[in-house]
Image (spheres, grey):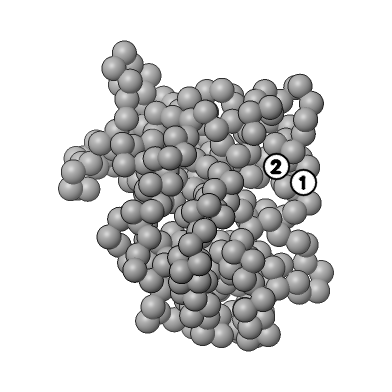
Amino acid sequence: MQVKLEDEDDSIYQRLPGFVGGSFLGTKSDSKNGSSVGKSCPMNHGHLAMTYFALATLTILGDDFSRVDRIGIARAIKKLQRPDGSFEATGFGTESGMRFLYCACAVSYMLNDWSGVDMDMAKDYIRKCTTYDGAMGLHPGQESHGGSTYCAVAALALMGEQKSFLKSDDRYFKLVRWCIHRQKSGFQGRRNKVPDTCYSFWVGATLKMLDAFDFVDTKACCAFHKTCEFRFGGFCKFPESRYPDPLHTYFSICALSMMKTKGSKALEPMLCISNRASKRGVWNRVDDDFGGAEQV
């Protein structure tokens, strides 16, 4: 189900402002059962994840967002929030859940404009995704997972709601305990899985935001990453992988940064960029040229 204002036609709705990751999105799926309906979808509209990545990249490069349609993106985010509080990735027939809720919060934070996010609905969705063990799944009723737990905790932190959401000692300690138990030298994403380099960031950054990173065995984690480092550069998913890839290399560097390895830069765990880049982000500026600065 997609959220759409009654006075908007499909052509306008499908061309929501934002950034795209390429010229082709894929094949449209049936929102009820997820099956393909055989209609190809050109990427001619904004995508929440691509918008987050684009703004983070622009921030790293020192851009001032002056050429970004900030108002249009905020309006698009509002249209993408579903009745259950989660967010769709695009304007028609795409998946939704905790990942895109995080992307919506990260984009709103970087744009310094929260007008597109109903925080109460978002927090309620996170609450419904919280499992018996204190961590979060991608959707209500699903198993706890390192990636979705990071997305939930980071979204709460970006909204400024982390402490109030976890004000119960039992809720906080259950979540910290679940994260700590994911370390098996490196970190696993969920129970009964082998360690994977990217989860050193997902779970490690969650512990960082919870002020519990001191519980991490950094020596063991660094040793695990060493076994995943390719001789010509880059990091693999786990030691048995044959080749490195950009995703696991980036998250490995982020994890090693949190462990303060030699030569690394301090990390902003909420946005997965360096503190240096975050501090010069436009959301930290108070000049009048950046619309919406007074809203936060």
Q: Is residue 226 above or below residue 211?
A: below
Counting from the top left corner in percent of width and height, residue 72 is at: 52, 23
* Residue 86 visible in the shown view: yes
- Is label 1 in a helix, a strand or a loop? helix
Question: Which residue occupies 38% across, 67% down?
Answer: 144
Q: Amino acid at mark 1?
A: Lys
- In this view, the residue in front, 109 or 159, is 159
Q: Quadrant of residue 45?
A: top left
Mark 2 or 1, closer to the camera:
1
Question: Which residue occupies 67% across, 23% down?
Answer: 291
Q: Residues within 10 Å of mark 2 (few under 14, many from 20)?
A: many
- Is label 2 in a helix, a strand or a loop? helix
On residue 59, the disc is 2
Give the residue number, with chain letter if any, for mark 1. Answer: 279
In the image, taking residue 39 as reference, residue 56 lies left or right, namely right
Distance of label 2 from label 1 (alpha carbons): 10 Å
